[in-house]
Amino acid sequence: MTKSKTAVNRRKFLKGAATAAAGAAAVATHIPASDAEAAQRAPGPAQEGAAPAPTAAQIERDAGNVAAPAAARPVQRAVIRPGSDLMVQVLKDLGIEYVALNPGSSFEGLQESLINYGNPPNRMPELITALHEESAVTMAHGYGKATGVPMAALLHGTIGVQHAAMSIYQAYYDRTPALLIAGRDLGFIQAHSANDMAGMVRSFTKWDAQPKTLAETLTALQRAYNEAITPPMGPTIVVVDIELQKEEAREMKVPARTPPRIAGVDATQAREIAKGLLEAQNPRIAVGRLRTPDGVKQAVQLAELVGASTSTAATQGPMSFPQRHPLCGPGATTAYDYTVGLEAEGAQVSIIGPGLSTLLERDPTNIGFGGIAPAPAGGRGDAGRAARGRVIALDAEASLAPIVEEVRRQMTPDRQRLVQERSAKHAAANEKARVEALQQALEQKKAGWDATPISTARIYAELWPLIMKEDWCLSSPSGFSGGHNTQLWDHDKPYRYLGGQGAGGMGYGAPASVGAALAAKSRGRIVINVQTDGDLNYAPGVLWTAAHHQLPLLTIMHNNRAWHQELMFVEYMCGVRGRGGERGHIGTTLRNPSIDYRMMAAGYGMAGEGPITDPSKLSAALKRGVASVKRGEPYLIDVITQPR
Amino acid sequence: MKQKMNTTFLGALVAAAVALSIASAGAQAPAGGQGAARPRSQPPTSPVTGNAVTGKQLYEGYSCYACHGYTGETGRAFVGNWSGNLATETSFIAFLRGRANVAPAQPSTSMPNFSAATLSDAQAKDIYAYIRTFRSHAPANAEDIPVLNQILGASQQPARP
């Protein structure tokens, strides 16, 4: 099909569009006898000329209000097997659960396949309606952290990719997998197209492709998935031309996919590490953030096999050792004689998979986003992650199976007995330390218990007994809200706490929580989002997505009516310059008028209540909220809080 | 059923707090934060000459609440943990002035400087009068809060697999 490469003259464009619409109306009532005929009748380049105004019936039909008469419905489609059906089949084969998108013409073929192809249609994957591309990608970010596998997002041309750019960067910096597909239509609106669509996000994506054929597209989608889940995990992007989405696939089949091989330690290294753990009197395993829940399971297996006390990163983010496991804690004695780090520092061995700095070749302009370029030790980014002991730059999760196997091989009855004795001592010591730490924390958390505005500690404390017996996930970063979950809650599953924003970008909490809630919905969980007010206002339309898709998401506003940290920064600067702090609130607070988040939620169709200022009314509101999300209905509680 | 906290542990905490309070009662801390006395659980008893009503407006207008909470109990709390810098009006004013010319390279949430040109001694005394009205909004012991007992009780149950 010939495509116009010339720049768009708006007048010509509008006339052409009207002509094309009239042509499309004619095609709708015609039944092509063959593919060849359909191809012959395909509209050519837009012609300038007089076009009749659409009739009332046409307008109604375009608005979706009128169904074509049964007798006029085509019995044969212009394209029997569109290429986009095969693309969706690839997503199905990959197990992609959801595709979030904000609609755009450059992927209309793919969108049509998503909603109509398959039996039942619009399932695995299901289309999730996003109100902003940044929201769509951050949903994938939250989903990826909760599950360890990618969700997909569709982006419309240059404008969609740029809307999504910050969220792509954030997922990249957080090393979270996501599969992004950007539609491209060179023949429609030039401003929405680019020769190299992924170029503008290349410095902060893991991999990209802009295939030229349908067959290449299918392979590229498979490879994009593989690259996304291979460490360092991250978002990948495939640019898909509209022609490839609409082309007739005929007998083409989806190619077989080979899963990626992720390298872990070899047999010699596994043997050495197993020997070190088994021969030590007091072995220690430091566990950071692994890739998937399976990795966490294997880490638990290894710790139990060797009777090692462990440290965990479960209070900082997902995919780490269960916080209340009997072996989790300092153990009976902290005189460790052999420490292995799994994506963490170990005194003897640190198994740490490749970081973002291994992707520097994808930053050809040397922008050095996020300081991932080589930096002095102690600098920002993963280049500053100094590890002690011998560093094995391989994926820790992939290393666990061979180490476990080797431990089993080297195990003897004597060693088994020592492991059991040591484990019992660790369990007793860890339990004592944990309860004492909790008691101290409770004394601290009671400060301001009955104060108005409500203390953030009280939110977390009141909430915990209501969810502790549920299968919950705290999706929001808790650092700005006092981090009280880290001391009060029990992070015993890989998805309990999803950690920070990735790159500290605001506008993350709500959409990431929707992504986590998508993961939760199909797994029978509920999601808690303690939502800072400044963060919500970047793209609050995501509340509608939660309501529309009936997600089990409880949002509790930490409403301090400010971008609070910035307020403190500006106040400090006022002091440094000796010009007074009484104007520090300008540009940092959200007052006059104060925002009513219950009304905001109601406007998007989400039930809720508030603002709550009386701490004695908090618990009942939280109970109503938890009950609502357990029914699968999202709920928002606006709580006026102390600043931190 | 109400789960009682570990009374031995809590009792020790309370006893320590009471002992600290008795030991420091009536003592005056040196000014300016340098060599200040240990924080005290009870508020100072030194004279107050400012206007607490005006002080409330200043406490909020100058964003003191931003770091210390609206009641001095959250964030960088001082209620129940009264710094020697808050022992007297004089020590408080000296502390406000003492942060001059501290300009860290990175953004800071440290205590800002308040020079006399931007916050007069009279205004500082008003703020001081206001914060001296602050009292704890919490029961004396965590064990007096049912939900905190519930949390402790649950933590002593066996972990779920």
Image (cartoon, rainbow, N blue to C red):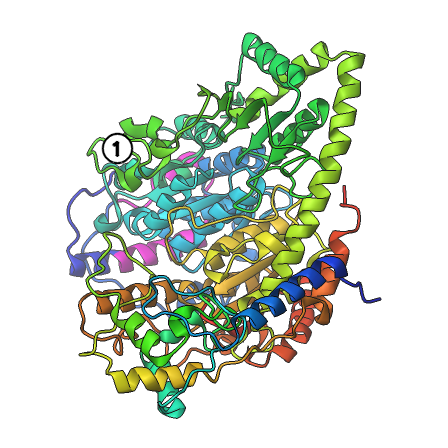
Q: Residue at x 52, y 42 (%)?
A: A144
- Asked whether, in this view, residue B139 is left or right of residue B129, the answer is right
Query: In the rendering, at what x and y percent does residue A593 appear?
Result: 37, 82
Residue A415, magenta (yes or no): no
Q: Quadrant of the N terminus of chain B?
A: bottom right
Q: Residue at x 54, y 37 (%)?
A: A149
- The kind of residue tagged 1 is Asp
Q: Nearer the viewer, residue B20 or A586?
A: B20
Residue found at the very far right of the displayed protein: B1
Residue A27, magenta (yes or no): yes
Q: Which residue is mark 1?
A: A363
Q: Which residues are magenta?
A: A17-44
Q: Nearer the viewer, residue A545 or B4?
A: B4
Tally the marks.
1
Tell me if residue B116 comes above or below residue A328 in the rendering: below
Query: In the rendering, at what x and y percent does residue B101 appear?
Result: 19, 62
Q: Nearer the viewer, residue B127 or A199?
A: B127
For mark 1, does the 10 Å Cα neighbourhood hold few (<14), some (14 to 19), or many (20 or more) residues? some
Q: Quadrant of the C terminus of chain B?
A: top right
Tell me if residue B140 comes above or below residue A1 in the rendering: below
Tell me if residue B47 comes above or below residue A619 in the rendering: below
Name the magenta segment's main secondary structure: helix
Tell me if residue A482 comes above or below residue A284 in the rendering: below
Q: Residue at x 39, y 92 (%)?
A: B53
Residue A325 visible in the snapshot: no
